[in-house]
Amino acid sequence: MKPLLLSLLCAGSLSAVAGSFDRHCVPCHRKEGVSLRQTFMNALLIYSGEHNMKAGLKYFLYHPSIETSVMGRAYFRTHRLKKPSRLPEKEMDAALDEYWERYKVIGRLK
Protein backbone atom coordinates (compact mmCIF):
# COMPACT_ATOMS: atom_id res chain seq x y z
CA MET A 1 0.00 0.00 0.00
CA LYS A 2 2.79 2.45 0.87
CA PRO A 3 4.64 2.05 -2.48
CA LEU A 4 1.40 2.84 -4.35
CA LEU A 5 0.81 5.96 -2.28
CA LEU A 6 4.41 7.07 -2.77
CA SER A 7 4.23 6.58 -6.55
CA LEU A 8 0.96 8.55 -6.71
CA LEU A 9 2.48 11.39 -4.71
CA CYS A 10 5.55 11.44 -6.96
CA ALA A 11 3.42 11.45 -10.10
CA GLY A 12 1.37 14.32 -8.72
CA SER A 13 4.52 16.27 -7.88
CA LEU A 14 5.95 15.76 -11.35
CA SER A 15 2.80 16.93 -13.10
CA ALA A 16 2.71 20.02 -10.88
CA VAL A 17 6.31 20.80 -11.89
CA ALA A 18 5.67 20.30 -15.60
CA GLY A 19 5.31 23.62 -17.37
CA SER A 20 2.76 24.82 -19.89
CA PHE A 21 4.88 23.56 -22.78
CA ASP A 22 5.07 20.00 -21.41
CA ARG A 23 1.37 19.94 -20.53
CA HIS A 24 -0.10 21.56 -23.63
CA CYS A 25 2.33 21.13 -26.54
CA VAL A 26 4.40 17.97 -26.10
CA PRO A 27 1.54 15.43 -25.84
CA CYS A 28 -0.12 16.55 -29.07
CA HIS A 29 3.15 16.77 -31.02
CA ARG A 30 4.10 13.32 -29.76
CA LYS A 31 0.71 11.91 -30.74
CA GLU A 32 0.89 13.47 -34.22
CA GLY A 33 4.53 12.39 -34.68
CA VAL A 34 5.70 15.96 -35.28
CA SER A 35 9.21 16.85 -34.16
CA LEU A 36 9.26 19.88 -31.91
CA ARG A 37 12.96 20.40 -32.68
CA GLN A 38 12.31 20.42 -36.44
CA THR A 39 9.37 22.78 -35.99
CA PHE A 40 11.62 25.05 -33.92
CA MET A 41 14.34 25.06 -36.57
CA ASN A 42 11.80 25.82 -39.32
CA ALA A 43 10.39 28.69 -37.26
CA LEU A 44 13.87 30.02 -36.49
CA LEU A 45 14.73 30.07 -40.20
CA ILE A 46 11.56 32.01 -40.97
CA TYR A 47 11.44 34.41 -38.00
CA SER A 48 15.22 34.62 -37.30
CA GLY A 49 14.98 35.70 -33.67
CA GLU A 50 13.34 35.08 -30.33
CA HIS A 51 10.87 37.97 -30.30
CA ASN A 52 9.67 37.50 -33.89
CA MET A 53 9.51 33.73 -33.54
CA LYS A 54 7.39 33.82 -30.38
CA ALA A 55 5.07 36.43 -31.88
CA GLY A 56 4.73 34.48 -35.15
CA LEU A 57 4.06 31.16 -33.46
CA LYS A 58 1.59 32.75 -31.06
CA TYR A 59 -0.31 34.32 -33.95
CA PHE A 60 -0.33 31.00 -35.82
CA LEU A 61 -1.55 29.04 -32.79
CA TYR A 62 -4.47 31.42 -32.27
CA HIS A 63 -5.16 31.81 -36.04
CA PRO A 64 -3.87 28.65 -37.78
CA SER A 65 -3.64 28.60 -41.56
CA ILE A 66 -1.57 26.72 -44.10
CA GLU A 67 -0.24 30.03 -45.42
CA THR A 68 1.23 31.06 -42.05
CA SER A 69 2.53 27.63 -41.01
CA VAL A 70 6.29 27.16 -40.70
CA MET A 71 5.89 23.58 -41.93
CA GLY A 72 5.10 24.30 -45.57
CA ARG A 73 2.28 23.06 -47.79
CA ALA A 74 3.70 19.54 -48.29
CA TYR A 75 3.35 18.88 -44.56
CA PHE A 76 -0.43 19.20 -44.83
CA ARG A 77 -0.69 16.32 -47.29
CA THR A 78 -0.19 14.00 -44.32
CA HIS A 79 -1.17 16.17 -41.34
CA ARG A 80 -4.25 18.17 -40.51
CA LEU A 81 -4.40 21.82 -39.54
CA LYS A 82 -5.24 22.13 -35.85
CA LYS A 83 -8.11 24.22 -34.54
CA PRO A 84 -7.25 27.60 -32.99
CA SER A 85 -5.76 27.32 -29.52
CA ARG A 86 -7.95 28.30 -26.58
CA LEU A 87 -5.01 28.44 -24.21
CA PRO A 88 -5.07 31.64 -22.12
CA GLU A 89 -2.49 34.19 -23.29
CA LYS A 90 -0.45 33.95 -20.07
CA GLU A 91 -0.08 30.17 -20.46
CA MET A 92 0.67 30.53 -24.17
CA ASP A 93 3.47 32.98 -23.40
CA ALA A 94 4.86 30.62 -20.74
CA ALA A 95 4.76 27.67 -23.17
CA LEU A 96 6.54 29.68 -25.88
CA ASP A 97 9.18 30.79 -23.37
CA GLU A 98 9.75 27.17 -22.35
CA TYR A 99 9.91 26.11 -26.01
CA TRP A 100 12.52 28.76 -26.75
CA GLU A 101 14.66 27.81 -23.75
CA ARG A 102 14.52 24.12 -24.54
CA TYR A 103 15.49 24.28 -28.23
CA LYS A 104 17.47 27.52 -28.66
CA VAL A 105 20.90 27.13 -30.18
CA ILE A 106 22.44 30.39 -28.95
CA GLY A 107 24.78 29.78 -26.04
CA ARG A 108 24.90 26.03 -26.64
CA LEU A 109 27.35 25.82 -29.54
CA LYS A 110 30.97 25.04 -28.66
Image (cartoon, rainbow, N blue to C red):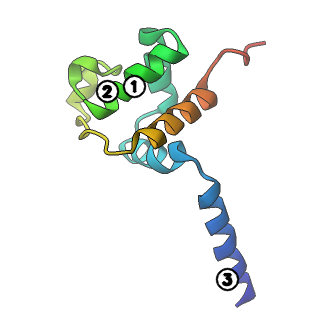
Q: Within 10 angstroms of label 2, few (less than 14), some, or many (20 or more) residues?
A: some
Residue under the point 47% across and 43% down: 91
User: Between marks 1 and 2, how big is the CA–CA gap?
Assistant: 5 Å
The amino acid type of the residue labelled 2 equals Phe
User: Between marks 1 and 3, how big is the CA–CA gap?
Assistant: 41 Å
Q: Are marks 1 and 2 in contact (CB under 8 Å)?
A: yes
Q: Nearer the viewer, residue 30 or 10?
A: 10
The amino acid type of the residue labelled 1 equals Leu
The vertical placement of 95 against 18, above or below, is above
Where does label 2 land, which residue? 60
Residue 64 location (% of width, % of height): 25, 30
Q: Are marks 3 and 2 in contact (CB under 8 Å)?
A: no
| Disc on the earlier residue, 3 or 2 | 3
- Front: mark 1 or 3: 1
Q: Within 10 angstroms of label 3, few (less than 14), some, or many (20 or more) residues?
A: few
Residue 106 location, quadrant: top right
The amino acid type of the residue labelled 3 equals Leu
Numbered marks: total: 3
Q: Is residue 66 left or right of residue 71?
A: left
Residue 89 location (% of width, % of height): 41, 38
Residue 110 location (% of width, % of height): 78, 12
Residue under the point 28% across and 25% down: 75
Residue under the point 53% across and 38% down: 94
Residue 68 location, quadrant: top left
Secondary structure found at label 3: helix
Q: Quadrant of the N terminus?
A: bottom right
Where does label 3 land, which residue? 4
Q: Within 10 angstroms of label 1, few (less than 14), some, or many (20 or more) residues?
A: many
Image disc number at residue 57: 1
Residue 100 location (% of width, % of height): 57, 27
